[in-house]
Image: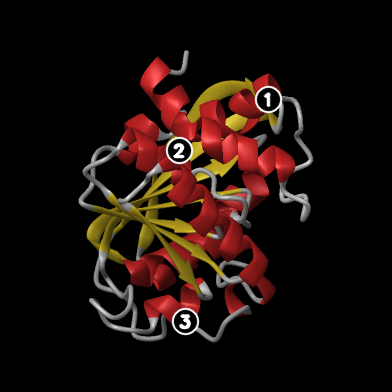
Amino acid sequence: MIEPELRRRLAPVLDLLAADPASLSSIRDPEEAWRVHVADSLSGLELAGSPARLADIGSGGGFPGLALAAALPDTRVDLIESVGRKCEFIERAAAAAGLANARVVCARAEEWAARAAPEGGREAYEVATARAVGRLATLAELASPLLVRAGRLVAWKGRRDPAEEAELERAGPRVAMVAREVRWVGPYAGSRHRHLHLLAKSGPTPAELPRRPGMAKKRPLGAR
């Protein structure tokens, strides 16, 4: 159940998404969009907690970042997205919803993590989120240099994949990230087997991170 105040705040975002000519989402039915985008995003709220700063990696059409910004008005939410048209949409959506605590970072996560705070995002966030972005080992590598020590990553995934989780375990020591919890949160239209993976930063940022943009996806450190 989505609280009425959150519905009021996020309605302009879904209106823009439905009308967007760039088709950032294939969902056009309003009620389906509430479930696919908003309810799914809010399923990670408990694991995310109430951090001072949160980084949403690969924000795409703005979820889960915009939904979390609406639910956590005291949290600074940086939505990191490298595609210009998506950045422009997220900026318009945040403005329409009056989300003053949401900021678009139009850059690759690796580029943002290479720059020291406050001008950049290196070790600047207590929590990172990622929804439908990539494999767990890739997400762990992208999140690690963005997170403070003991920071957390919440990753939205579908059906559990033992091979993918083993890849994460192998990569863990090299990216200073460790799996803490996997939580089933039920079916959503975007994923019939939605699971949330909670990872924690287990030490200082490894000197080799971030690698060059794209390397985390092309050559995951946990791959055999």
Q: Which residue is mark 3?
A: 111
Residue 23 vs 194, above or below: the answer is below
Answer whether labels 2 and 1 touch (C-beta < 8 Å).
no
**Number of the label disc, if any, that sits on residue 72:** none
Q: Does dot 1 land on a helix, a strand or a loop?
A: helix
Residue at 47%, 81% (x, y): give it. Answer: 111
From the viewer's perspective, is the residue at label 2 or at label 1 nearer? 1
Q: For the residue carrying disc 3, how many other residues have a C-alpha within 10 Å: few (<14), some (14-19), or many (20+)?
A: some
**Can residue 168 be seen?**
no
Left or right placement of residue 53 versus residue 163 in this view: left
- Quadrant position of residue 37: top right
Q: Which mark is residue 30?
A: 1
The residue under the point 31% across, 75% down is 122
Give 71 or 97, whichever is nearer the viewer.
97
Q: What amino acid is labelled 1 in the image?
A: Pro
- Pick whichever, 67 or 18, lies toward us: 18
SS at circle 3? helix
N-terminal-most mark, 1 or 3: 1
Where is residue 22 drawn, in percent x and y?
77, 56
User: Spatial distance from mark 3 to mark 2, Cα to Cα?
Assistant: 25 Å
Q: Position of residue 160 (x, y in %)?
A: 63, 37
Type of amino acid at the residue the image marks with label 2: Ala
Task: Give the label on residue 67, or none.
Answer: 2
Relative placement, left or right, of 111 versus 34 is left
Eye-nearest disc, 3 or 2: 2
Compared with 162, 90 (above or below) is below
In the rendered image, residue 24, in percent from the top left (x then y), is placed at 72, 51
Residue 97 falls in which quadrant of the image? top left
Residue under the point 54% across and 36% down: 12
Q: Within 10 angstroms of label 1, few (less than 14), some, or many (20 or more) residues? A: some
In this rendering, the count of numbered labels is 3
